[in-house]
Image (tube, helix red, strand yellow):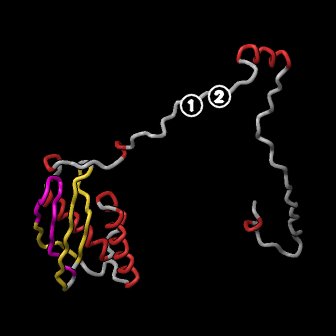
Amino acid sequence: MSIAALPPQDDTTPEPVLQPIRVLPIPDHRPPPVMVTPEARSLLTAVVGERYVQEQLDVDFDVDDEPLRPRHTCRSDLPDPRHWAAHLAQALVEIMAGSRPAPQVVRWTTPEVYAVVARHAAVSARRGRTGARRTRVRSVRVCEPADGVAEACAVVIDGTRVRALAMRMVGLDGRWHVEALQVG
């Protein structure tokens, strides 16, 4: 029973006696040393040689890290860009308004775009505007200037304001990534 859980004491109840803390040494967890007997040493030198030298390790430090890099994806292997642009635009404006957490779009943005979006979210949070207004995407237009690249613009209603949002999406690893973002 802890001291805090003890019943209230009156004048007849003796005070509890606290025991001093015992400090114990930390046990040694190292393995015991291996003693090599002279017979074992002579056997080892007969088998291995006078001096054992480890040969070259079979490690290739010039490994091609191509499988780890994001791969460009053709347009035929990507989903409809208009649908994705609308959903990404809605998510991005909600994050910048402060009504959605920024890490939700980290998979679909480059680090530069994510930093801009997270900074806008932080500014909205400091101003106290989180969740105060409902933002929604009114319309989306998409053009595809190259294979696996889509440029989209969206009209966004932000409270009483109408704003424009433009983004460049690139197909990487089978999904669209926002590579550039402009909010007007």
- Under mark 2, the amino acid is Gln
Point out residue 8 in the picture as x, y percentages from the top left corner.
Answer: 77, 72
Residue in the foreground of this view, choosing between 42 and 70: 42
Q: How many marks?
A: 2
- Residue 18, above or below 25: below
Q: Are marks 2 and 1 in contact (CB under 8 Å)?
A: yes
- Under mark 1, the amino acid is Leu
Q: Quadrant of the N terminus?
A: bottom right
Residue 153 lies in magenta, yes or no?
A: yes
Point out residue 44 in the picture as x, y percentages from the top left corner.
Answer: 75, 17
Point out residue 151 in the picture as x, y percentages from the top left corner.
Answer: 16, 64
Residues shaded magenta: 142-158
Residue at the spot of label 1: 57
Residue 147 lies in magenta, yes or no?
A: yes
| Distance in Å between CA atoms under marks 2 and 1 | 8 Å
Identify the secondary structure beneath mark 2: loop
Q: Is residue 12 left or right of residue 132?
A: right
